[in-house]
Amino acid sequence: MTKQENPLRKYLSKKVFNRLRVLTIISIVLFVAAFYEVVVNDFNILYALTSIILGIFVGIIVSRMYHLSWDDETNQVVSNMDWIGAIIFILYIIFMIGRSIVVGYWVHGNTYMGIIISITAGVMIGRITGTRHTLSKIKNDLESIKKSLVS
């Protein structure tokens, strides 16, 4: 059996591809953990959904931490952290530390763990969503440039 390669994979630098792969694995594990908290530990599903949605919004904003751009030399999408990304990274660290303190102040036990896991799962899903949106935007820009050169 041969391994079928994604045709878009060759246009992503190894760093970007591996980051997406790790984020996907982590988000699946955290989402399963959040589901486990809801089913087994009777964590309120409304809290779980609200926490995941909050996390997705934060994750979409945080996905801008790494600026993705097209590199003409390698013909790949590459990422780097610029000053805006550095500021977002610092705010993200503050959010991750602050969420534990704030949530821990209001809730305890299974609810605390469920909210933390759900927010983190949402952040990972949001980062993937934001990164995929940026990649899609780069792809569309490249296609429009290619069409304008052909015309």
Image: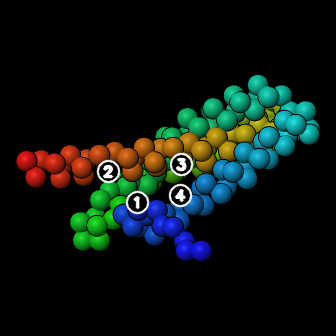
Q: Residues within 10 Å of mark 4 (few under 14, many from 20)?
A: some
Q: Nearer the viewer, mark 1 or mark 4?
A: 1
Q: Quick one: SS at disc 2? A: helix
Corner quadrant of residue 106:
top right
Q: Nearer the viewer, residue 31 or 5?
A: 5
Q: Quick one: SS at disc 4? A: helix
Q: Where is residue 101 shown, x and y percent of the image?
A: 74, 40
Q: Quadrant of the N terminus?
A: bottom right
Q: Which residue is mark 4?
A: 20
Q: Which residue is mark 3?
A: 128
Q: Residues within 10 Å of mark 2 (few under 14, many from 20)?
A: some
Question: Do the CB atoms of the residues marked 3 and 4 lie less than 8 Å apart?
Answer: yes
Disc 1/disc 2 C-alpha distance (Å): 10 Å
Q: Residues within 10 Å of mark 3 (few under 14, many from 20)?
A: many
Question: Do the CB atoms of the residues marked 1 and 2 lie less than 8 Å apart?
Answer: yes
Q: Quick one: SS at disc 1? A: loop
N-term mark: 2 or 4:
4
N-term mark: 2 or 3:
3
The amino acid type of the residue labelled 1 equals Leu
Q: Which residue is mark 1?
A: 8
Q: Where is residue 7 shown, x and y percent of the image?
A: 41, 62
Disc 3/disc 1 C-alpha distance (Å): 16 Å
Q: Where is residue 145 shown, x and y percent of the image?
A: 17, 50
Q: Residue at x 43, y 55 (%)?
A: 66
N-term mark: 3 or 1:
1
Give above or below for 96 relative to 55: below
Corner quadrant of residue 71:
bottom left
Q: Which residue is mark 2?
A: 139
The amino acid type of the residue labelled 4 equals Leu
Q: Residues within 10 Å of mark 1 (few under 14, many from 20)?
A: few
